[in-house]
Amino acid sequence: MFDSMSISQVSITNMGMFYKFTKKENTFICTYCNGELLSRLGFTKQEDVIGRSLLDIFPAAIADMKSKYCQQAWEGQFIQYEVTFNDIYYAAFLSPVFDGGNVVEVVGSSINISERKKTENEMVQAKEEAEKANMAKSDFLSKMSHELRTPLNGILGFAQLLELDESLNEQQQDFVQEILNGGSHLLKLINEILDISRIETGKLKVSIEEVHLQNVMDECISIVQPLANKKNISIDKQLQQGQNVLVLADRMRLKQVLLNLLDNAIKYNREGGKVTICCRLDGDAQVIHIVDTGIGFSAEEYSKVFVPFYRIEGTKEAGTGIGLALVKQLVHLMGGKISVTSRKGKGSDFYFCLPIPNDFKTVLRLDESIEPSAENERKTDNYCLLYIEDNESNLHLVSSIIKSQPSYTLLSARTGKEGLEIARNEKIDLILLDLNLPDIDGYEVFDRLKANEQTKDIVIIGVSANAMPQDIQHTLDKGFDNYLTKPLNVKEFLSIISETLNSTINQNIPDHKILSTGPYGEDAVSAKMLQLSLKDLKKIKEKKYKAAIAMHYTENDWSRSQVEGVKAAFEKMGIEVVAVTDAQFSWEQQVTDIETILSKKPDIIVSIPVDPIATASAYQRAAGAGVKLVFIDNIPKGLQYGKDYVSVVSADNYGNGIESAHIMAEKLGGKGKVGVIYHNADFFATKQRTEAFENTIRENYPDIQIVAREGIASPKDGEKVTSAMLNKHQDLNGIFVVWDVPAEGAMAAALTVGRNDLVITTIDLGTNVALEIARDGLIKGLGAQLPYQQGVAEAILAGYALLEKQAPAYVAVPALKVTKENILDAWKLVYNQEAPDIIQSAIK
C-alpha cells in the first residue's frame, strides 16, 4: 500500500499538486502542500500555504467556494471540481480520510488543465465559426436557387408553348424536348438544394402526424409505375391490403422520401428487374425496405451515397447526386434513420425507420425472458484467443483490450502446462504465448504445440519484453507467426492480431463427414483440412503470379459467391486475377474463353467445364503450356491428376442429396408420391445429388414412391418440365429439383395450377429459394453448398501447386441442411455475410 501511495503522490506532484487540510473549529487549515502547480499558481514556497487557512491563501470568493467543497469532503463525500486562479485552470479532487469511523483529514490533488481548456475554447470557437460559414453557405444557396428559378420559369414556360406548336418539324420538336428535359433536371436540382439549405438553416419545418403507410405507398407506386413499365420492371409491394400500418411522419415529406428511393430503385435497375417494398416492426419503429435487383455498389460507398453530389462508381445514369442526401436529411428530421446494404451486380436494399404511435408500440417481447443458449454464444465469425501469461497485470490488460472487440473471445492460462491443456481441449484460433513462463520455457511450449496433431495448426504469436532485433528474428525463424513486444501498444496489438489471423488462410467450415466421392471414385478430403501458412503466403507473394477464372455461368448466387471466394483468397496470396469469364453454358464459348485467357499468360486457371468431352482439348493445351489447373465440380475427359491438373473441388453433392431427401420425407410425413427433376448431362456433381436423393428415399422411406422422373438440359426448363409432370401426375405430393434455379421454375408452375400444397426440395441456397423457405412457401428446405468456402479451397489448392506441395486428387466442402429454422445462420455460413434484410424480415 505504501509503495502504491508513494508512486501516486510522486506522479501527481510532478504533474500538479498534492495537499492536505484539517479542520479547526469551522476553518480548514492546510497541513501539507507540494507540487509543480504550486509555483504556477503564484506561490513561491510551501510556507506560503502550509499552516494557513483558505481565506489566508485565496481571495474571498474562491476561499468560500473551496471551503464548501472541503466541508462536503469532511462529511464523507468524494469531490471533483474545476476552478481558475491567476489565469491557471486546474481540476481538483478531494477525498476524506477516516480514522475509527470519523473523518480526520481531507486530502486533495490538483492538475493543471489550462491547455485542455484552451483547446476546448478553440474547438467551441471553431464550431461557432463553422456554423456561421454553414449558415452563410445555406443562405447563399437559397438565394441562388431563387435567382435561378426566375429565368428558368421563362425557359420552361416558353418551351412548353413551343411543344404545343404543331407547325414544328420533327427535328425542332426534338430540340424542344431537349430544352424541357434539361430545364426539368435543373429545376429538380434547384428544388433539392433549396430543401437541403432550409433543413440546414432550420427553416424547413415538418408537421408530424399519424400517417397510413399503405396509402402513401400506393400513391407513390402509381406515380412511378409508368417509369417501371418502360424498363419492364415489376414492383412487388409486400404489404397486405387492409393492414393498418401507422407511422409518425410528415405525410408530404414521407411521400418525397419514398418517391426518391423508388425512382432510384427503378433508374439503377436492370431491364426486366424487380423492386420490392416491404416493412417490418422493429421495437418502437417501423422499418421500410426498398429493395432492387440493380447494379449495386461496394460497401465502401455505403456512407458516400448520402453525401451531396456523390455519384455511384461506374454508373451511366443521369442524376443530380443530391437526392439521397435530401432523403437522409428528411428522414432524420422526422425522427428516423436510414441505411443501405448492397452487393455489386445483385442490387441494393435502402431501408429507413420511423417511429410509431404509442398505441402500436411493443410492450412485451417473446424473447425477453429467454436466455441465449451456450451453443449460440459463439458466432461463426468469432475467433477464440488463448493468452498464456503468468503476470496478472498483463492478463488484465489484454483481457480489457479484447473486451472491446466483439469478434474475439479470450481464454487465459497462467502456466505453460495449463495452456497446453486448454489448447488441446478447446477450439483455439490464435495463441498469445509469453516466452518467459514459470514452469515451462515459452519456446518449449511452442515445440509441444507444434508436435501435437490437435494443436499443430494453431496460429501462435510470441509475446516478450525482449525487443532486441536478433531475439525477434530468432523467434520468427523458429516458426512463430508473429511477435509482440511489451509494453503493448493497444493499436499495434489489435492490428497484429487481425493481420495474423487474416494472413493465414484456412477454412472455418463445419467438420462433417464427406459422403461424396470424386468423378473417378476418389476418396474425398475435406476442404477444412487445407491451409496455407504465413511462410507459404510470403513465398507466393514474392513471385507475383497471375490467375484466371473460367466459369460455365456467372449469373446466379452460387457462381458469384464461388468467384468471390476464389478472388478473396487470391488477393490474400498476392495473386492477380487477370480474367473472369462466363460461357453461358456453351462449350464453344468456353473453348474461346480459354484461348483468350491463355493469351494473358496466367499461371493458374480455376474452371468448371461446361462439357467434359467437348472442352477437353482446350484444357489439354492449357496444361501443356504449364498452367496449373484446378477444376470445379467436374474434370475434362482424358486429363490426369498430378500431371495435367492439380485437383477437383466440389460440394458434398451426395450428402446434400441425402439432406434434401430427409427434408422431403419429414414434410410429407413419411408417405406420398414424388417426382424427380434431374440434370440431363454428363455431370458427376448433379448425378450424385439425384442418386443420393433417390437412394435415400428408396432405402429409408418405403411409403414414399418416386412415380415420375424428367430431365432438364437448362435451368430455364424447370417450369416447363414441372407443368408437364403435374399435368400427368395430378396426385403428386412433392418434387425434388436438382438445383435452385430450375426449382424456382417448378415453384412457378405449381402456383400456376393452384398446387399450394406441393412440397419442393432442392440443392443450392439462392436468394429466391431462401426467401421462399423463410416465408414457409412451397420450397421447404434444401441441401446447401458452401460456394464461398469452395472458392477459397480452390485458391488454396492453386497455392499448393505453386509451392509444389502435394494436393489431394479430390476435395469436397461439407453438406449443409437448410430449413426455415436455420435459414439465417445457413446464409451467413454459405455467403460469408448476413442474410439480406428482406430474408430476415420474412423469417420474423
Image (spheres, helix red, strand yellow):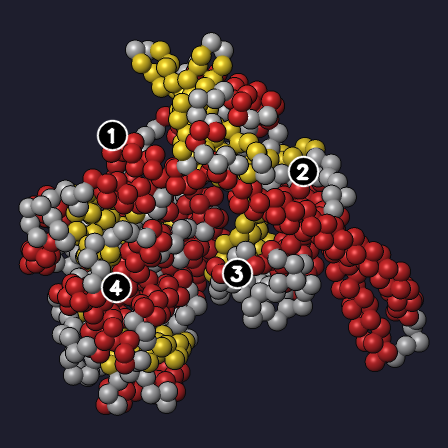
- When the figure is inspected, residue 3 is found, relative to residue 140, above or below; the finding is above
Residue that carries the numbered disc 2 in the rendered image: 249
Q: Nearer the viewer, residue 262 or 254?
A: 254
> From this viewpoint, is residue 290 visible?
yes
Q: Residues within 10 Å of mark 1 (few under 14, many from 20)?
A: few
Q: Residues under labels 2 and 4: Cα distance?
A: 49 Å
Closer to the N terminus: mark 1 or mark 3? 1
Q: Residues under labels 4 and 1: Cα distance?
A: 51 Å
Residue type, mark 1 in image: Phe
- Helix or strand or loop: what does disc 2 sit on? strand
- When the figure is inspected, residue 211 is found, relative to residue 347, above or below; the finding is above
Residue type, mark 3 in image: Glu
Q: Residues within 10 Å of mark 2 (few under 14, many from 20)?
A: many
Closer to the N terminus: mark 4 or mark 3? 3
The picture quadrant where one finds residue 757 is top left
Q: Residues under labels 2 and 3: Cα distance?
A: 28 Å
- In front: mark 1 or mark 3? 1
Residue that carries the numbered disc 1 in the rendered image: 2
The picture places residue 620, in percent across and down from the top left corner, at 25, 87
Outermost residue on the top side: it is 25
Q: Residues under labels 1 and 2: Cα distance?
A: 63 Å
Residue type, mark 2 in image: Ala
Closer to the N terminus: mark 2 or mark 3? 2
Residue 93 left/right relative to 500: right
**Marks 1 & 3, CB-CB < 8 Å contact:** no
The picture quadrant where one finds residue 467 is bottom left
Residue that carries the numbered disc 3 in the rendered image: 301
> From this viewpoint, is residue 737 visible?
no
